[in-house]
Image (cartoon, rainbow, N blue to C red):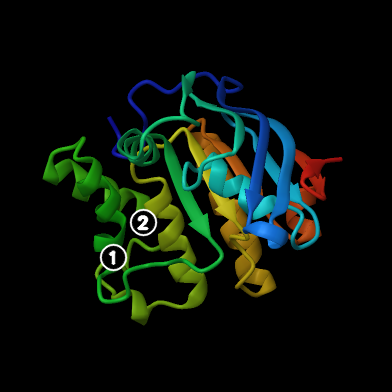
Amino acid sequence: MSPVTAATPAPAGDLVLRCTNLHRHLGQGEGRVHVLKGVSFEARRGQVDAIVGPSGCGKSTLLYLLGLLDQPDEGQIEINGQRMSNSDDLARTAARGAHIGFVFQFHFLMLEFTALENVLMPMRKLAKLAPGAMEARAHALLGSVGLGEKTRRLATQLSGGEQQRVAIARALANEPAIILADEPTGNLDMKNSAMVFDLLTRLAKDHGQAVVLVTHNPEIAQRCDFTRPMRDGLFV
């Protein structure tokens, strides 16, 4: 089996994430704001969804809820049929490691480590593979994003576009069902933006993963399978 091929890939189109009637308030007292006002959403394997809208409309708040980095005040989140919105911190952390990959605007690589070591980190934490298999998979993932010759480079020795490609390889490391991307091309020039988007969506589709991305870039949004505009805490 290839190190970057899932052992039992689910058919394209399978539902992997569902949220229902999500509400989220931020702040306290008179400054308390109703950021999400009953959002419902589904994500399926092999599908790329773009969430677009002005700053402050709730896009990133929704993404953090879907990624189990925050909890809703009301509503439900299910991942692979398992209800997660009311789970304890231990269960949420385990679900993130097993089912969700993250790509952010700023790559958040560990700069003192090599590209290979950055991709190995989530695999070592999940500990699903033997050490040799982890390293083989990390090499294969970096090769798939065009960095096979730079696996031993420190993150500080890579360009911005290369660092974001390492972040994509890292997000794919544990074969997650869902990739959540918050402005993944927002810190890149036009050429690198197109390259990073193409790599992210191609690799996710090849391996049957759902992609949910937040973007302000209309060209990126138009190339997604579905575009979901948000205004004032709701899809419109």
Residue 142: which numbered mark, if any? Answer: 2
The residue drawn where x is 46% and y is 78% is 159
Q: Residue furthest front?
A: 29
Residue 12 percent location from the top left of the image: 57, 23
Marks 2 and 1, the one that precedes in the sequence: 2
Q: Are marks 2 and 1 in contact (CB under 8 Å)?
A: yes
The residue drawn where x is 23% and y is 47% is 125
Q: Is residue 163 left or right of residue 233?
A: left
In the rendered view, tell whether residue 25 sits above or below residue 196. above
Q: Dot 1: within a 10 Å radius of its alpha carbon, few (fewer than 14), some, or many (20 or more) residues?
A: some
Q: In this view, does 5 lie to the left or right of 29?
A: left
Secondary structure of residue under mark 2: helix
Amino acid found under the numbered disc labelled 2 = Leu
Q: Which residue lies furthest to the right in this view?
A: 236
Amino acid found under the numbered disc labelled 1 = Thr
Q: How far apart are marks 2 and 1 (CA)?
A: 7 Å
Q: Is residue 60 left or right of residue 86?
A: right
Pick whichever, 11 or 84, lies toward us.
84
Secondary structure of residue under mark 1: loop
Pick whichever, 158 or 226, lies toward us.
226
Q: Is residue 21 left or right of residue 67?
A: right
Which residue position is annotated with label 1? 151
